[in-house]
Image (cartoon, rainbow, N blue to C red):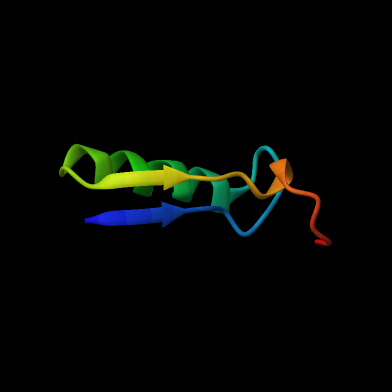
């Protein structure tokens, strides 16, 4: 399975970011191929 994971917030300590990190780790542990992006790395209006 392939997954794209990202948080809906660009704040460093956001709950969304923590959930996204945990979801990515769980998915990797079960064998999924995970791409995790940070929205703050992209010049998009937020």
Query: In the figure, is residue 5 to the left or right of 38?
Result: left
Most distant residue in the left direction: 30
Q: In which quarter of the image is residue 21?
A: top left
Relative image position of residue 2 (x, y in whole percent) = 29, 54
Query: In the figure, is residue 8 to the left or right of 22?
Result: right
Residue drawn at 62 percent across, 59 percent down: 8
Q: Quadrant of residue 3?
A: bottom left
Relative image position of residue 40 (x, y in whole percent) = 72, 44
In the displayed structure, 40 sits above or below 1; it is above
Relative image position of residue 20 (x, y in whole percent) = 46, 49
Q: Nearer the viewer, residue 14 or 37?
A: 37
In the displayed structure, 34 sits above or below 2; it is above
Q: Can residue 28 be seen in this view?
A: yes
Residue drawn at 79 percent across, 57 percent down: 44
Residue drawn at 42 percent across, 45 percent down: 35
Query: In the figure, is residue 34 to the left or right of 38?
Result: left
Quarter in which the N terminus is drawn: bottom left
- The number of discs equals 0
Q: Can residue 11 be seen in this view?
A: no
Query: In the figure, is residue 14 to the left or right of 36?
Result: right
């Amino acid at each position: 399975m392939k997954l794209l994971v990202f948080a809906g917030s660009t704040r460093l300590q956001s709950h969304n970011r923590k959930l996204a990190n945990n979801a990515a780790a769980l998915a990797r542990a079960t064998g999924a191929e995970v791409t995790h992006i940070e929205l703050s790395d992209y010049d998009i209006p937020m």
